[in-house]
């Protein structure tokens, strides 16, 4: 089971949202990192077959989204959590997911209702099934959006910022859920949280200004900053980014001065080195 | 509570081998003792099954008027739900349609001697267009993205809702038409054909533009064209005009068919 | 949460509260219903009817008496409805307690009364159970037991007479 993009481009006016993106997704969880405006949502929308790229080729589970009948088949096997899922605020959780189940061609009412209850239970919303959406918190609505993405046990999951607004406990439960699902599915997860990436992603792709800057394992992303993270007693001058820790010391990422106390890099450090470099227009590390 | 039920008594009760008096006593006690109620043994699968039955009846929301009406007309419930969800089919909107039509009818009649039936014939065909614009699309449907991404063909969805909007508009129009002081040469087709033509044109344009934009363009174009025609004294509702509207409707239908795969995706075809 | 609090939550549309109430009360309600009807399906359906009714009318509970007793009142009537194949559920007002004897008979401690009741034949006992212990009206008891209302009245009178004799 694979999903492949080849030289996908999408232009909006003068903005090159996607500028020749190519990669291949396999079973497991792939994280998509990138600053705002990097093109993540555009990319996810192309993968979700909602948006047609200008040029380039997509292959989703062996099917071609440009062909209408295959596009429908892709949609049958895919679950999509958009960045801004819209809700019918006066609907109850149950009715909303039920409606989306109808859109996903669950015609038989008994089977459909059982499926709705299954996904509500998976996302911990069983007790809220009769609560109106307008009474739900942002985090719960996000879970509801995730629940509808799980309808029909799709083989391909496209999740745009699924943990946004979730408190740590819920993020933890989300990770549990997704790791279990990803055993035999292709999951692409776009996020701002590097902890999500280090916790559950087998692979990570870094997107910036419409281009792939990195495509590899989280460990290799961290390695980009190997030898470039240090502790300083005072505000470091040659740091790309730094902050003050509770101990009073500064943690800096960039070009360490001689004799500095080098520490192990995290994924975030690698990400900063990568994206920071791109923003400055200097040479970047190849994947 | 001076005494409580003992487990063996409960056992005998469950098996039905307890005497009637002891049963009555036990039952009365259970009705007011929470601790003893907890002693009642049950099978977890049974409890889940029982709960599933309750939840199955309690969780799904009641269907609205529109859904139930459609159900009675023989429409399968999943189709009825798709149709009924659109904002255009809320009672408030339907009421608005009725009011505007009625107002237009009355206004045509009330004006000058002989009335100005043209007011009705300009306004009324636009109502289904507005209905369609409110039935589908990012502007009016919060779940538009999820709707587009679903396996159900978006054009089919749009057509289902458009049909319903047209059906309602035509019904209301049929009721309002007798009020309109139209000359005897003009039949009901005088507004039906323009209504169909405009609605289908909106659908055709929706393959390229957002539905609300398509509807606005059609409405704007229609009003401009009508004002122009009427100010120049052109007869916009005679038989020749009717033929023109039918031709437009046919052309729009052809375009919709040709573009049928472009409704459920954004972005230009390559 | 207490049962009364659960009912308040149910009134607000919180299904989790109904589920908890179901967990607490379904087992004993099912057992008690099963002692009124040997038809398992009927009992299951009546049990579900009960909780569906609770979902719709949680606000009807006015806080008088135990929630459990209120639930039983609904459950037994749902059973009767099912027995009659009556599609339209009606929740009749519980029968008014008529006399001091009824008050005593409906009491919790059964001591001497138990002995007295043991003297009753099955038919008389059934009427006592329906009218006094389950709180049904004469008409409801007649429906449940499938006997005429006149018979219900005479049997109840006879039963009370026997028990009075025993207690004297």
Image: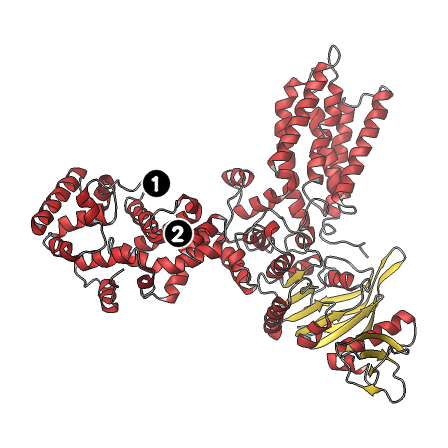
The crowd level at tag 2 (other Cα within 10 Å; few <14, some 14-19, many 20+) is: many
Instruction: Let me know if residue C129 appears in the view.
Output: yes
**SS for dot 1:** loop
Instruction: Let me know if residue C34 appears in the view.
Output: no
The residue positioned 90% from the left and 78% from the top of the image is A238
> Which chain hosts label 1?
C
On the image, the x and y values in percent for residue C162 come to: 9, 48
Which quadrant holds residue A239? bottom right
On the image, the x and y values in percent for residue B222 come to: 80, 31
Q: Which residue is tagged 1? A: C90
Residues under numbered marks 2 and 1 in contact, where contact means CB atoms less than 8 Å apart: no
Relative to residue B62, is residue B27 drawn left or right? left
- The vertical placement of A82 against A258, above or below, is above
Question: Closer to the camera, A268 or C83?
Answer: A268
The crowd level at tag 1 (other Cα within 10 Å; few <14, some 14-19, many 20+) is: few
Question: Closer to the camera, B224 or C45?
Answer: C45
Question: Closer to the camera, B270 or B48?
Answer: B48
The residue positioned 51% from the left and 54% from the top of the image is A108
Q: Earlier in the sequence, mark 2 or mark 1?
A: 2
> Which chain hosts label 2?
C
| Quadrant for the N terminus of chain B in the image | bottom left
Which quadrant holds residue C62? top left
C-alpha distance separating marks 2 and 1: 14 Å
- The vertical placement of B196 against A236, above or below, is above
On the image, the x and y values in percent for residue A118 come to: 52, 62
State the residue lying farthest toward the bottom: A259
Q: Which residue is tagged 2? A: C51
Relative to residue A109, is residue A266 drawn left or right? right
| Quadrant for the C terminus of chain B in the image | bottom right
**SS for dot 2:** helix
On the image, the x and y values in percent for residue B90 come to: 61, 38
- The vertical placement of B108 against B225, above or below, is above
């Amino acid at each position: 089971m694979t999903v492949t993009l080849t030289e996908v481009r999408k232009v909006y006016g003068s903005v090159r949202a996607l500028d020749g993106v190519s990669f291949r997704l396999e079973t497991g969880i792939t994280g998509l990192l990138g600053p705002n405006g990097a093109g993540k949502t555009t990319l996810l929308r192309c993968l979700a077959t909602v948006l047609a790229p200008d040029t380039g080729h997509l292959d989703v589970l062996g099917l071609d989204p440009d062909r209408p009948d295959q596009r429908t088949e892709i949609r049958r096997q895919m679950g999509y959590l958009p960045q801004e899922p819209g809700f019918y605020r006066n609907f109850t959780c149950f009715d909303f997911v039920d409606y989306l189940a109808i859109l996903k061609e669950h015609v038989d009412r008994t089977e459909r209702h059982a499926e709705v209850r299954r996904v509500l239970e998976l996302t911990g919303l069983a007790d809220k099934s009769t609560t109106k959406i307008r009474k739900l918190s942002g985090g719960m609505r996000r879970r509801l959006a995730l629940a509808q993405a799980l309808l029909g046990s799709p083989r391909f999951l496209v999740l745009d910022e699924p943990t946004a607004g979730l408190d740590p406990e819920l993020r933890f439960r989300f990770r549990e859920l997704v790791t279990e699902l990803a055993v035999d599915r292709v999951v692409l997860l776009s996020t701002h949280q590097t902890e999500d990436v280090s916790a559950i992603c087998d692979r990570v792709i870094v997107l910036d200004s419409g281009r792939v800057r990195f495509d590899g394992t989280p460990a290799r992303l961290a390695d980009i900053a190997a030898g470039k993270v240090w502790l300083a007693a005072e505000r470091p001058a040659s740091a790309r980014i730094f902050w003050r820790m509770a101990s009073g010391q500064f943690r800096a990422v960039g070009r360490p001065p001689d004799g500095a106390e080098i520490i192990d890099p995290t994924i975030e450090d690698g990400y900063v080195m990568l994206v920071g470099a791109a923003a400055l227009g200097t040479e970047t590390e190849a994947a | 509570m001076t005494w409580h039920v003992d487990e063996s008594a409960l056992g005998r009760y469950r098996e039905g081998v307890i005497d009637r008096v002891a049963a009555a006593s036990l039952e009365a006690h259970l009705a007011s003792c929470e601790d003893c109620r907890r002693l009642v043994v049950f099978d977890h699968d049974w409890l889940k099954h029982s709960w599933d039955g309750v939840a199955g009846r309690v969780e799904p929301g009641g269907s609205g008027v529109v859904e139930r009406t459609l159900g009675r007309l023989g429409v399968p419930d999943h189709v009825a739900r798709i149709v009924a969800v659109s904002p255009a089919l809320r009672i408030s909107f339907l009421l608005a349609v009725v009011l505007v039509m009625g107002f237009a009818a009355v206004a045509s009649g009330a004006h000058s001697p002989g009335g100005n039936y043209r007011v009705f014939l300009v306004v009324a065909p636009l109502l289904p267009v507005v209905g369609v614009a409110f039935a589908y699309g990012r502007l009016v449907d919060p779940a538009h993205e999820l709707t587009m991404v679903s396996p159900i063909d978006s054009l089919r969805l749009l057509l289902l809702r458009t049909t319903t909007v047209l059906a309602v508009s035509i019904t209301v129009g049929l009721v309002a038409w007798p009020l309109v002081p139209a000359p005897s040469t003009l039949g009901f087709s005088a507004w039906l054909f323009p209504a169909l033509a405009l609605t289908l044109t909106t659908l055709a344009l929706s393959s390229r533009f957002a539905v609300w934009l398509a509807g606005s363009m059609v409405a704007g174009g229609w009003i401009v064209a009508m004002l122009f025609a009427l100010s120049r004294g052109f007869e916009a509702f005679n038989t020749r005009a009717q033929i023109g509207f039918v031709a437009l409707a046919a052309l729009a239908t052809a375009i919709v068919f040709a573009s049928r795969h472009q409704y459920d995706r954004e972005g230009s075809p390559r | 949460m207490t049962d009364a609090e659960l009912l308040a939550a149910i009134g607000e549309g919180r299904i989790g509260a109904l589920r908890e109430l179901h967990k607490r009360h379904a087992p004993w309600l099912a057992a008690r219903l099963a002692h009124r009807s040997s038809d398992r399906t009927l009992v299951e359906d009546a049990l579900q009817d009960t909780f569906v009714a609770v979902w719709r009318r949680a606000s009807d509970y006015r806080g008088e008496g135990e929630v459990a007793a209120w639930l039983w009142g609904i459950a037994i009537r749902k059973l009767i409805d099912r027995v009659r194949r009556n599609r339209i559920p009606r929740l009749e007002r519980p029968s008014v307690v008529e006399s001091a004897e009824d008050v005593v008979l409906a009491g919790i401690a059964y001591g001497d009364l138990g002995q007295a009741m043991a003297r009753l034949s099955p038919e008389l006992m059934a009427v006592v159970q329906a009218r006094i212990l389950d709180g049904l009206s004469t008409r409801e008891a007649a429906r449940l037991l499938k006997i005429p209302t006149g018979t219900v009245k005479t049997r109840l009178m006879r039963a009370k007479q026997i028990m009075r004799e025993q207690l004297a």
